[in-house]
Amino acid sequence: MLDVIAPLVVENTTKIVLLSLDGLGGLPRPETGKSELETASLPNLDALAVRGACGLIRHVAPGITPGSGPGHLGLFGYDPLFYQVGRGVLEALGIEFDLRPGDVAARGNFCTVDDRGLITDRRAGRISTEECIRLTDRLREIQVPGVELLLEPVKEHRFVLVLRGSGLSGALSETDPQATGKPPLPVRAHDSEARPTADAVNTFVTQARRVLADEPAGNMILLRGFDQLPDLPRFPEIFHLRAAAIAAYPMYRGLSRLVGMEILKTGAGFADEVVTLRQHWDAYDFFFLHYKDTDKAGEDGDFDAKVEALERLDGFIPEILAQKPDVMVVTGDHASPSILAGHGWQPVPVVVAGRYSGADPVGAFSERACAAGTLGIMPAQHLMPLVLANALRLTKFGA
Amino acid sequence: MLDVIAPLVVENTTKIVLLSLDGLGGLPRPETGKSELETASLPNLDALAVRGACGLIRHVAPGITPGSGPGHLGLFGYDPLFYQVGRGVLEALGIEFDLRPGDVAARGNFCTVDDRGLITDRRAGRISTEECIRLTDRLREIQVPGVELLLEPVKEHRFVLVLRGSGLSGALSETDPQATGKPPLPVRAHDSEARPTADAVNTFVTQARRVLADEPAGNMILLRGFDQLPDLPRFPEIFHLRAAAIAAYPMYRGLSRLVGMEILKTGAGFADEVVTLRQHWDAYDFFFLHYKDTDKAGEDGDFDAKVEALERLDGFIPEILAQKPDVMVVTGDHASPSILAGHGWQPVPVVVAGRYSGADPVGAFSERACAAGTLGIMPAQHLMPLVLANALRLTKFGA
């Protein structure tokens, strides 16, 4: 699809705001029959739904629950089934690690093994983050000839391993046997080109076991999700947009940088994000704004907290609209229904509001109301072309 | 898509019922402007539509009328354009013939030819099934060296020919010239590998003409739809489901066996099927239940009979729900509008009801009401992933 869109893109001075409410979609609470969006008082989002075109976004396919990576790549215009990003790369992006082309990243777990080397706990009892920082630091003493090793703690038992050097490959099997009572597996190369990388990783793992031998809380490691930065078409170039990302959480800054957006420095809350938007308004054509609280409440299974997070966000809408974007889009990267306490597969409401969006009979910004909108149920990667069209930045296809 | 789904499947103890109402969809009767579903009184299906998520299923593509094979393969999760099953194989499945891998099956017609060997009736005046049984038995005396020939009567002028042996191929042209006044065509091999099979079939046809020479009611045969069992991924393995099919009609048992479901012995009516469901409830995770009466009435062009068939079925819904399936799905394999008196291309209502299905504004189980549902118009092969997700049997895609 990007090959069809790219030649149609034309210059304009119009401005676009894409506001992603993380984990936006929900499900009715059995007690009331109403979802979080239907329970919350959202005068500003509802008004936007009244004057814009509404629909539902399906990020991957029916029944498929998107992770944050595929969820956002879809919103940015990339077919998430075609452009896949490995877990190691996402983990590195999540701590804003400066991953470079050619680097191989893996997600690491500290684990525990018994005297015979058999795994007793794949997550080392979820050791504290402080302990993780200390153990990761010990791994930094390991040297493997010909490869630079970069290690960063993440959270609890998780860390990131990055191999840097020439001729590396991410075509490697995982060391995690996904069960206790088994030994960690040696890494295998999926093709002959990946053999030197497999050798380097196996050397590292052997040494890690030696280094950690006197650490009963986490005396071994497991590695999975080896991958390199994917070669994604650059968002600012394919869409001819000076594009900026404003996100308080590192994962979303990382995903935005992955597609070539500029990352604007901002504070820890959404109020800071809106200030950042205002400060940089003139310098960019496209702003990606990320709001995390909806997902956090949904993943915690806290229906009331999600309702409150939605209402807080609603209060910021007038400030954003005060910048007078030509096209204002509100949607999310996936559902996080509180009754599921995790990501969901349900399609997510979307509103596209602008001078040429048209208005449909939708009177509220909710899952059920948007299902009747004129945008229908839309694959996520179709959103960006629609937004560009609304910003009069796409010429016609065929004479 | 199956390649994307299979790695996401996780184990669970949830139970799923997929109820297929054959030929479910209809069209408004001009006198009343109401379809069969809209005319029938369906309190239980309507209640299911109220509490579940609704939509329409399109089995192949807009305007394409599905046969029973593609219609059910789609419901089972297989893209019917990718996984095609030949007519000979379907005919063999329809009589529950024990077709084995490597067998080549063809659909046969008895026909009549004149003294010069030119076809005078391609269906031999639709001879009686008794006559078909007698003529088929006569064909059993034919022997072709190196190939075992298996012959079974079907109905009226139709029979099944199966060739069994090593190195056989279904890449063969048909002998039916699709016109009277022409001679039956010799079978041609589509590739060199199929030449021995073509020779065997041509030998069989020559001998059939000799054997039937003294049978004026059906003195020749036509063969078409040569094919072998397709190599379908096995349903229980890709979806990690202990899957059972409960169907009174042999064709649907055959299609279920084709994808690897277990076939449960049941009686001739739907009441028997529900008893069978109850008896085997604990032993399986997934039940495919088939109801034939809706299609039969639709194909007969009997609007009132179809309304009654729907109402009878509706009465069984509480008994099925009494088993407390975690996910209850009701849909069909294709439309059979009474005013068409045959299969139709119209998309077919679907309801998915479970704890996490969400409810949409749909208040009735009908073509028009379901068009406003949150599932939208969905390709049939997307139903199984959606059902698995609702049964909490799919993990997320991407981190």
Image: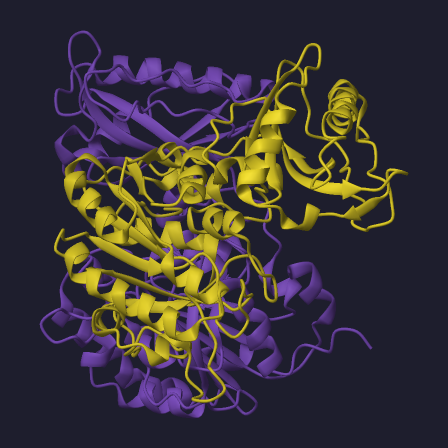
Chain colours: A purple, B yellow
Q: Quadrant of the rendered structure where residue A356 is? A: bottom right
Most extreme residue toward the top is A116
**In which quadrant of the rendered image does the C terminus of chain A lie?**
bottom right
Q: Is residue A263 visible?
A: no
**In which quadrant of the rendered image does the N terminus of chain A lie?**
bottom right
Against A91, residue A30 (above or below) is below
Q: Quadrant of the rendered structure where residue A371 is? A: bottom left
Residue B142 percent coordinates (x, y): 68, 19
Q: Residue at x 39, y 78 (%)?
A: B372
Against B37, residue B156 (above or below) is above
Most extreme residue toward the left is A31
Against B70, residue A354 (above or below) is below
Q: Nearer the viewer, residue B92 or A269?
A: B92
Q: Nearer the viewer, residue A139 or A161?
A: A161
In the rendered structure, the answer to whether residue B212 lies left or right of residue B235 reads right
Most extreme residue toward the right is B116
Q: Residue at x 45, y 72 (%)?
A: B26
Q: Is residue B7 visible?
A: yes
In the rendered structure, the answer to whether residue B321 lies left or right of residue A94 reads left
Residue A288 percent coordinates (x, y): 45, 70
Residue B327 percent coordinates (x, y): 24, 54
Residue B369 percent coordinates (x, y): 37, 78
In the rendered structure, the answer to whether residue A162 lies left or right of residue B312 reads right
Q: Quadrant of the rendered structure where residue A106 is? A: top left
Number of residue marks: 0
